[in-house]
Image (spheres, rainbow, N blue to C red):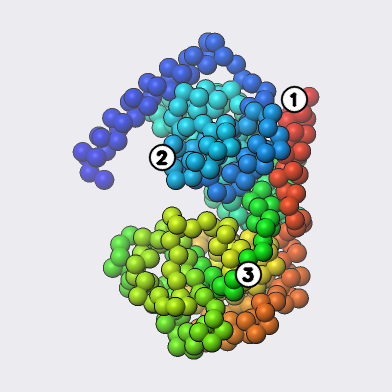
Amino acid sequence: MDIKNKLKNKLKVIPVTIYVEFLKIIYILFLKKKDDIWLICETENQAQDNGYHFFKYIRENYPQKKVFFLIKESSPDYFKVDNLGNVIKYMSIKHIIYMFQAELILSTHGLWMVPREFGILKKHTKKIIRAKKIMLQHGIIAIKNVEKEYNKLKFELKDGFVVSSEFEKEIVINKLKYTEEEIFLTGLPRMDNLVKNNKFKNKGILLMPTFRKGIDCNEKKFKNSDFFYQISNLLKNKSLNELLSLYKVELNLYLHQNFQQYNNLFKKFENENIKVLEQKKSNFQDILKNNKLMITDYSSVAFDFSYLNKPVIFYQFDCENFLKTREKAGYIDIKKDLFGFRTEKEEEVVKKIENYIEADFIVEKIYKQRLNRYFKFRGQNNCERLYKKLIIFLKTEDE
C-alpha cells in the first residue's frame, strides 16, 4: 500500500473516532449496562450461519427477549433479519450504545463490531464493553488446528465456547484453555434448520473443494495451479460424464468464497449434467439438502453434510502439499479418521461415485460410527439447549 492510500485510510478513522467517542461519553455519563440485551452477529455482511439461526429461533420462540442482530444495511442478507425485527444497522447510534449496554454478545467471528478508532481509543472502547462474550462457532473443530485463532489468552470471545461433542469439548479445554464451565455442549444452532424439511428428492452430487493459500491473488496464478488442473480434470473426466448422463445425476461445483471470482474458468466444463453454482445466487443450506453426495477434500462443511446421514468422498489429490501449508496439524488424522471414503486418485473418485449411485447413496456403517465421535446430539434441539444454558450461565455469573 502506498503512502497516499495509507494517509487516506488514516483520515477515514478520524470521523469514526469522533463519533464513537461522543457516544461513549453519553454512555458513561447517562446510561448503564442492561441485564436483558443480547447482541448476536456473524460478520458485517452475513446472516446465514449459527448467529442467524439462533437469532431466528429466539425471535420466533421467545419474542419478548431483547435480542438484536447486528449487520450492515447494505448486506444482501439484511432483509432476512429485518423481517424478523430487532435488526441493528452497523455503525448506527443503536449499534454503539447497545454494544456498551449488552449483557451478552454472541458472535461467530470475534469482536469485529468494535469500530475502527485510533489504537489506544479502540483498546479503551473494548475495555468498557462489559458483556459476556460467547463464541458461537462456524464449524466443527477437528480437521483444522485453531489454536492460533481461538486460544482464550488472545481470542476476544473468551467467556464461552459452543461445541458439538465431548471430543470437541476436550480440544477447547486442553488446547484453547477454556474452563469446563465456559463450554456450551449443545450442538450448533444452524444444524436445527439443516435437519428441518430435509426432503429434497434430487440426486445431485456436490463438489466442494476448500481454499488453498496463495493461488487466489490473480487469475493467471489460479489457472496455473495444481488445484485448477485437478478439479478441471475431474469435471471433464469421460467416465464421470458418461456416468452422470446414464443415471441422470447432476454434479454441482461450489467453490470456496475466496475462489468464487474464478467461477468463469470452470464454466466451459458445464453441460447438461455439470453446473457451476454462484454463491450470491445460492442458499447454502438448500445446496446441502439438495444433493445426495458430497465430494470435498479438507473442508469442515463435510460435517454439516454428514449430519444429514449422507455420504462424503474426501478427494485429497494434494494431501502432502496441503499439510505442508498448515503451521500445525489438526486434531484428527485426515488419512485415517475421516467419516467418508478417502482417496488421492481421480479414477477411484469416479468408481466410488458409481458405487454410491447404485447403492442409492447409503452411508457405510463404519463412517456412521466415526461420525458419532463428532456429534453428541442429532436432531432439532440445539438452539433450545443453547438458549437454556445461556440463561443458566448468566444467572450463575450474577450470583
Q: Nearer the viewer, mark 1 or mark 3?
A: 3
What residue appears at the point 50 percent right and 84 percent down from the top-left corner? 245
CA–CA distance in space, label 2 to label 1: 37 Å
What residue appears at the point 55 percent right and 67 percent down from the top-left corner? 298
What residue appears at the point 65 percent right and 56 percent down from the top-left corner? 194
The residue beneath circle 3 is: 201
Q: Which comes sooner in the sequence, label 2 or label 1? A: 2
| Amino acid type for the residue under numbered disc 2 | Ser
Q: Are marks 2 and 3 in contact (CB under 8 Å)?
A: no
| Image quadrant assignment for residue 377 | bottom right
| Amino acid type for the residue under numbered disc 1 | Asp
Give the percent coordinates (x, y) of residue 117: 40, 29
The residue beneath circle 1 is: 398
Q: Which mark is residue 74?
A: 2
Which residue is at the front of the view, 175 or 335? 335
Inspect this view and state whether residue 15 appears. yes
Give the percent coordinates (x, y) of residue 113: 49, 35
Q: Are marks 2 and 1 in contact (CB under 8 Å)?
A: no
- Dot 3, crowdedness within 10 Å: few (<14), some or many (≥20)? few
Local SS, label 1: helix
Q: Which comes sooner in the sequence, label 2 or label 3? A: 2
